Image (cartoon, grey):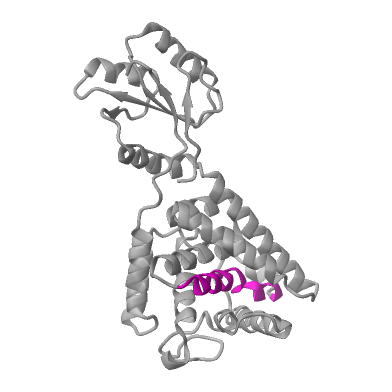
Amino acid sequence: MGFELDLLDPQKPIPADTMFLMVDVDLKNPDMLSRLRAFRKVSQRGSDLVIAIGKNDLQDELQATALGAKKPIVKPISEKSIATYIEQRRTASGMTGKTATAAAEIGAKAIKDSFDEFKNDTAIDVDKISEAGRNIAASIADLGISEWLSTVRIYHQSTFQHILLVTGIACAFAQNTGMSKADIAKLTQAGLLHDVGKVSIPDAILDKPGKLTAEEFDIVKRHPVDGFNKLNAQGNIDASILHGVRHHHEYLDGSGYPDGLTADQIPDLTRILTICDIMGALLEERSYKPRFSVAKSIEILKEMGKEGKLERALVLALETVMKKPGSTRSNLSKLANPSS
């Protein structure tokens, strides 16, 4: 999950900046209890103390609770039990791994730069977009999509958050459905670039909290073409990426925009990007709607599949990807007792 694992010396004070502390020690040892109490006094707000206790050991359970452990773990400790606990606490406490945070920051910087380049009518730096895509792909391959979604929600808002969510979902889809490295790169870059045309939308419309008027929505609907025209004029963007940028709001039944394409006119990469774009929007909290769960979002996509707007097989594939557990690596500092 992208966190560092440190084995602490039980003879030394516990570092105050430890955010996850797992303890497998003798809770009847006065010296050890003193060290744990000292840590609780200086630990950062939001830090978690996890104490391993013997099965049906009421005395240890009471002692663990008194020390501030929210939920003791029953011995023997397994990698799975550690990973499960962190997964439960990580999102609730707003903690994310350094790897995902770094990749999100690189991605956000690349998006901001591309928006600025669009505004200034200069060429968008494709190399920077490619580098950001590689970092995101490496992070998701290592940590999983759940970690990416949590990181992006914590650190980025508005349009950048949406683009990063969509990019991560699209990348995870490509990685977990056997797509080639070249196609993973294309889909990831398409995610980063798909909404660059929103630069031309006035902020009053883009950030409007209520429902858009018909005239305002017509302005919003121009962003795929504006983005396509800008990127196409550069002459150094792959054709499949350009297609995704222009047509990520098209539906198989011809009811989408800007060109009203139908199924036989929409290639796989664009179909995938469309589904991931909708998924990202559903998972976001916006002024006019709450953030939907993954399950609810998939349910909505399936209904759109039944209506003939989306390819149902791709929706089912995305469902499998979104439910796939991430890496089991953790950022758990473990206080080890040499005698245990």
Magenta stretch secondary structure, dominant:
helix
- Residue 256 lies, in percent from the top left, at 49, 85
Which residue extends farthest top? 30
Q: Residue at x 38, y 69 (%)?
A: 177
Q: Residue at x 58, y 79 (%)?
A: 241
**Please, is residue 48 above or below residue 310 in the view?**
above
Residue extent of the magenta highlight: 180-200
Which residue extends farthest left? 56
Q: Residue at x 35, y 85 (%)?
A: 308
Quadrant the C terminus occupies: top left
- Residue 172 lies, in percent from the top left, at 45, 63
Query: How many labels, in total?
Result: 0
Q: Nearer the viewer, residue 99 or 270?
A: 99
Q: Look at the image and tell me whether residue 207 can be seen.
A: no
Horizontal side of residue 176 vs 131, given as left or right: left
Horizontal side of residue 291 vs 73, given as left or right: right
Q: Residue at x 76, y 70 (%)?
A: 117
- Residue 298 lies, in percent from the top left, at 35, 67
Magenta highlight on residue 182: yes
Horizontal side of residue 326 vs 213, given as left or right: left
**Please, is residue 232 above or below residue 154 in the view?**
below
Q: Look at the image and tell me whether residue 27 can be seen.
A: yes
**Please, is residue 294 above or below residue 270 in the view?**
above
Quadrant in the picture for residue 244: bottom right
Quadrant in the picture for residue 199: bottom right
Magenta highlight on residue 68: no
Q: Nearer the viewer, residue 225 or 220?
A: 225
- Residue 150 lies, in percent from the top left, at 48, 51
